[in-house]
Structure formats: C-alpha cells, structure tokens
Amino acid sequence: MGTVSRVVNGGVNVRESTRRQVLEVIERLGYRPSHLAAALSRGTPRTVAILVPHLTRPSTVVRLAGALAVLDEQGYDTIVCNVDTPEQRDHHLTALTVRHRADGVIIVSIPVAKHRIAAFLRGSIPIVTVDAVAAGVPQTIIDDVAGGRLATAHLLSLGHRRIGFVGDPATRETEQDLGFTSSRFRLQGYRRELTEAGIDFDPELVRLGPHSAAVAADLAGCLLRLPDPPTAIFAASDTQAMGVLSAAERCGFPVPDRLSVVGFDDIELTALLNLSTVHQPLEHSGAEGARRLCALLDGAKVRPLRQQLPLRMVQRTSSARPARAGSGGGRSHLLPAGADRRERERGKFSPHAWRRVTDVRLPRRNDYCAEGVV
Amino acid sequence: MGTVSRVVNGGVNVRESTRRQVLEVIERLGYRPSHLAAALSRGTPRTVAILVPHLTRPSTVVRLAGALAVLDEQGYDTIVCNVDTPEQRDHHLTALTVRHRADGVIIVSIPVAKHRIAAFLRGSIPIVTVDAVAAGVPQTIIDDVAGGRLATAHLLSLGHRRIGFVGDPATRETEQDLGFTSSRFRLQGYRRELTEAGIDFDPELVRLGPHSAAVAADLAGCLLRLPDPPTAIFAASDTQAMGVLSAAERCGFPVPDRLSVVGFDDIELTALLNLSTVHQPLEHSGAEGARRLCALLDGAKVRPLRQQLPLRMVQRTSSARPARAGSGGGRSHLLPAGADRRERERGKFSPHAWRRVTDVRLPRRNDYCAEGVV
DNA sequence: TCCCAAGTTGGAATCGCTTCCAACAGGGCG
DNA sequence: CGCCCTGTTGGAAGCGATTCCAACTTGGGA
C-alpha cells in the first residue's frame, strides 16, 4: 500500500496519526519489508561487489576496509568476492557480468583481461579498479616504478652500492597465478635508479619467488650467502621484507649494521618492526575507489580517469649507512635466539624447502632471476 | 517467459533447437537476468550477511576468508559488515533484523545483547555465531579458559614461576568497546592454572590495555621494569605477543633466554617469528560457521548447538626453560639494532605515549590490573 | 487412421515493494 | 456559501523473474 511505503521510507505527506497507526500495525505483525522487492521495484539493489585477491594479505584487507567504510556510509551493501586463483577470478568476473546483481563493481589489484573489461562496458556495468590499470576504467593507482626508485634511491643515498631485490616472479596472465604487476614494476624502478646512479645491474642480486615471508626469507638467505653479499635488500612488499629480516637474523647479518632492509606498503606491523618502507595509502586507496564508484553510480563523471596516489619513503631503523668493512657488531633481530639452529634442524627453513612445494607453479627457471623479467 | 527461464536455469525439457534460439537471442539482446527479480520470485536472495569486528585484525580476516570460501562454494553471495564501534554494531544488527535482505547471518566474535538475538529469533532469521556465545544460537567456539591454561601450563612445565599476562581490558558491553570476551577468559585460565600449581596470584603481573601490539609493548615494558620482573609473559593474542617481543628487545631481555613469550591464535606470522602460541583453527572456525548456517538454511538441524573446536599448544623458540640467575646472554630479537634508542628519542615508544591517545576509552584505572576483572 | 502419453511451449499468476494517479477531505478566500 | 488548492489516502500498474498449468506437438501403438 502506498501509505505504508511512505511511512517506512521518507515519511513525507503522511498525517502523524496515520503514521503512528501504521507503525503500530507493523510492530504488531512483525512485518519486515523485503529488501529484494524494494530493490526490484526501485530498479537498483544498492549493492556493490568488490573483487579482492588473497583477502588475508595485510595490504588487501586494509584496502577492503577502506572501501567498506565508504560504501557503508553511502548505504550500499557490499558483496565481497575473494579470489585466490585464476579460476575463481574468472568465475566471479563472469557471474558479475552475466547476471545483474550489483549496481557496480570494484576490482582490487587484479589484472583483468581486456575482453572481460569489455564485457562490463558492454553491459554498462559501472566499474572501477584500485591498484590495477584497465583501459577506459576509472582507476586509483600508485606509481610502482617510482616507488621502486624511491626505495632504491633511499638506499643509495645512505651509501649502499650493492643492493639486492626480493620480489614476486613475473608470471604471465595465463599461468597459475593472478599475475600481479606491482613487484615487476618496483623491480623496474630499482633497475632504473641503479642505472642512473651508474651502478651495473647484477642479476645475481635479484631473487624472485612466490609471495610469502617464508619464501622471501629463503631467497634473502641465498643473497646473504653469496661470496659478495649485498649490504642492503629492497623487498617488493613488507611481508617479504619481514622474511628478509628473518633471514638476516638467521644468517648473522645484524640489521641495519651489516644489512639494510627496505620494504613496501607500510602495513601496520612495519612500525613495530622498525622497518623502513615505502608508504602507500592503502586504506585511502580503497576508500577512493569506493567513492569514485559511488560517484559513477550517481551519474557523475569521474576524473581524472587515472587517479594516482602519492608515495613516500618512511625511514625507520632497518636502514642505515653501510658499515665500513670489519666494523660489524651490533645486533640484528627478528627471531628468538636459537631459531636459526633449531629451525634448520627441523629442515623447515632449508634453502630449498619451499621449492618442493611450489615447483609446479614456476615452470621457468629464469623466473628466479631478473633476466628477461623486467 | 517460461521457456527462457528454463533455458537460463536447469534447461530441462527444452528442445535443443529452441534452446539454441533462445541463447542466440539472449546474446544478441545482451540480456542479463536480474538477480533481484529471480530472488524475489524464488523467495530467497541466496545471500548471507556476515558481521565481523575489526576486519583488519589477522584473526578476523582469516575467519572471514574461511567463511567466504564455503559460502562461495555453496553459491551464496556474502555481504560483509565490518564493525569497529558499538554504534556500527547496532546499526548493522538493526538493519539486518528490520529489513529482510539476507537469508541468514553469521556473527563473528561480537558479543550480542540478548534482546538483539531475540529479534533475530522472532523474525525467524537463521543465525549462527563464530567465536561468540549466544543462548539458543548455533555457535562455533573455542574454550578460551582452557587455552589460557594450556599456555600457562606450558610455561609452568618449562619451570617458570613468575609469569606475566598482557591482554585486553575487560570492558562492559555498554562502554566504548565491543567487549570481546576472549582475553578475559584466557586470563581466567591463566589464573586457574597458576592456582592449581600452587602459585600465588600477583596482580602486578597482569597488565591490560587496548588491543594493539604497540600498547602491549608498552604494558610488557612496565612488567620488565618491575623490581622482580617475570621470566615469562603470556599474551592474550599473537598481535600482543609481538608487542611483548618488541618490548623484550627494547628492554634488553633476550628471548627466550631471559624472557619466554607465548601468544594466542597462531596467526600466520607467528611461524616466521618463532613465537610459541596456542593454536586455534581460525579459518576452520569461519568455514564451520558458514557450513552450519548453510545447513540451517537447508532446513537441517544443527547440532550440537555449541560446537567447540580444539586448541593445541605450539611450541616454537620464544619459550624455553628460564635461565638460572646470571646465565643470561644469547640474543633476543624483534627490532633492528638501535631501534630502542632512536625510537625513544622520537618519543614514539615512550612508556605512556599511547595513554594520551586512548585515555578516554579507559575510564577506570583498575582496568589495567586484574583486580575485579576476572 | 486415430488416440494417447510424453515432451514442449506460451501465458498467467505471483513475489512484495515503489510510484503514479485519482479521489477525497479540509481550509482559506472570493 | 461555493470553489479551488493543498494535503492525504487507497488503488493499480509495474519491476523481472519463477512456476504452475493449459494447450499444443509429436510419435508410437492399437
């Protein structure tokens, strides 16, 4: 009935007495308006879908939280689609385009194929991306190359000349992984900065492996056991940087006395760990993506199409001037004493342990080195 | 039209030629079935809402991921409601009961008032909780008291007699916080285990503060500066345990040589940090909650109403036998060397810094000590 | 050749709201 | 006192599927 609808919603043009009556009846009958019917009738579900990769990663969840806060405030319900594999990605992408269930879609960090983007546009489904580029789509991103340079420049300015890199392999879209691009671009920034500083690129100093602290620890371990180990390591993410810290500890490289470490993202833990890192506005990126989608849904124009958020180097105590030879000492610390020996005994951190597990995902040997990667 | 519906869905009893025709027309018209209309007609949105507190906390997001995986597989859309304050909690709880928008609701870790639960039951909205108790509601929980005992027993068995506790304050429901119960119960377990071991409870050794690694570091710092500091600290969560590790480092208490540390939850990072901890099946708890809700939605009975998941002590290298006086040495490590001094200079970790920020949330001084808390 | 059962197909009713519209009640003003 | 305008109310027409049902094919068996 018209009047009921008026009472439940705006409540304009309803006599106070009638209003009270209706409310009373609603209460007595335990009537609950159906969101569905309302949405169907209204023509819009006021629902947004957000596609995130690897939900549990700190950077992802912070972005998600940022987006949720905005969408919530704007009165949207948010359907969260977590994606760990290409199959899941495609499944959700298809579901989202094939059926009309959300007013709009936010895609976080996931590179999406052109034809999929086209499917959204064809269906005129509003869409924005966060931390991912897509032609013709409003996007909120950072400049990963610049970030890589920032970190590298910081280490160079401290006097480091032999700087290692630990990051993700550059997988193609077709492979097992989601094919994130950030690590690749950060590596690019690292290379460029080195080049501009007149330092020869040493492929040996670049180690790539699946995204995890444990793997990163392993890769860093390899670097530190080199005859001429780096005096600094730039990790493509804070998670990986933690792995590097752990490896430094285990290999007896006090941080920052014998090894400087720089991460990327500035997740919450970095402050506690005193990890120098490149700060990117994670939460804000999610919020901005959401805001831009809302604008799109309100029929407003979103511009610039490519919104680039600022980065900045945050220096903490994990990076410092390299020690002059033999000055060593100090303490480096991530793990309780004895972790090294004990873990080794259990074979848990053996240099190649993770490869056993992940070999299938890394078909080409040279994914492990910078050759042909950048 | 009936036939179209048959083609789009099951596709039974449709001649192959017609089917192809319909499909062709669908393609040509760019027709997208409306989830809303279907849901309205069908009578069920096939949508579930999940209420989580402090989404970005590691334990929360892992639970969420576990639930999402199951719901996804079961074909449900999942609306995620993140809750950081009591107002948000009430807002979402009200929205969920007042309007019919989800088939069912999962509540994670949030204590919910009786009348709110009643509202769900009255509206016969299927509901389950994870990591929270609620009378008459299917719940997936752990025994936090037992967990507290497990951790404490572990430390006692190593020979510790002076064991500190760092956890959350026991806020009432009406206060600013969400009033989580886990820390309180873990503290209870700690006290009981001590009592049974014939050790007098020392309120000085219990320090409570808002949930964060930084605060925990501060509280632990107070403990370590005591004339007779504890030889071990049990933290109510891994996040807080990380704070404790950090404090140990800063105060010059090598772990585990001069201080053993035990956490709770077994989040991913603990392995990297070699933190001994009480393992609880986080992801599994979310998955189980989701599974049970699905069962409820299928009209099945869920039992037992209270599903209790197992805990187990995971010993890593942050806990060991207490050193005999003067045997010290070894290294303790969480922070890069020099962090202590440098951070102190910036006042960042000054013992009382956080209180400035959070005082308003902690009206009663004795929330900081165990008196009247358990 | 005819009839009937099984297989197909289109149409109508329904889900529960929003929204537009017509009808109606008052009150102010001519 | 009557008219018009404003404020209020109930009714009807969708929204876009699902689902039941009646009608229509079709093919096999009598």
Image: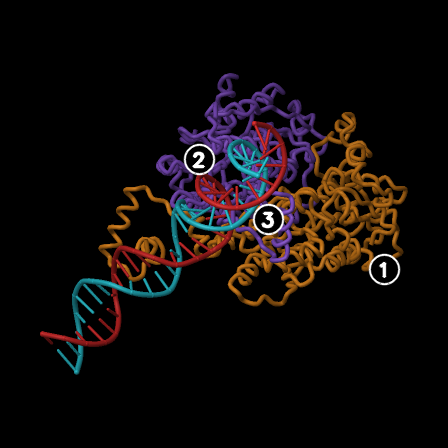
Chain colours: A orange, B purple, C cyan, D red
Name which quarter of the figure residue B74 lies in: top right
Residue C11: x and y, percent? 46, 50
Whether residue B220 is visible, yes or no, is: no
* Element at label 3: helix
Count of numbered tags: 3
Q: Which residue, given by chain and number where applicable, does mark 1 sit on?
A: A195
Q: Amino acid type of disc 2?
A: Pro
**Tag in front: 2 or 3:** 2
Q: Are marks 2 and 3 on the same chain?
A: no
- The earlier-in-sequence mark between 1 and 3 is 3
Q: Which residue, given by chain and number where applicable, does mark 2 sit on?
A: B126
At label 2, counting other C-alpha atoms closer than 10 Å, the crowd grade (few under 14, some 14-19, many 20 or more) is many
Name which quarter of the figure residue B239 lies in: top right
Q: Nearer the viewer, residue A241 or B65?
A: B65
- Residue A62 is marked as 3
Whether residue A174 is visible, yes or no, is: yes
Q: Nearer the viewer, residue B191 or B1?
A: B1
- Residue B314 is marked as none
**Tag in front: 1 or 3:** 3
Q: Callout 3: residue from which chain?
A: A
- Which residue is pictured at 52% across the width and 23% down the height? B146
Which quarter of the figure is the C terminus of chain B placed in? top left
Q: Callout 1: residue from which chain?
A: A
Q: Nearer the viewer, residue A128 or A243?
A: A128
Q: Callout 2: residue from which chain?
A: B
The CA span between labels 1 and 3 is: 34 Å
The CA span between labels 2 and 3 is: 30 Å
* Element at label 1: helix
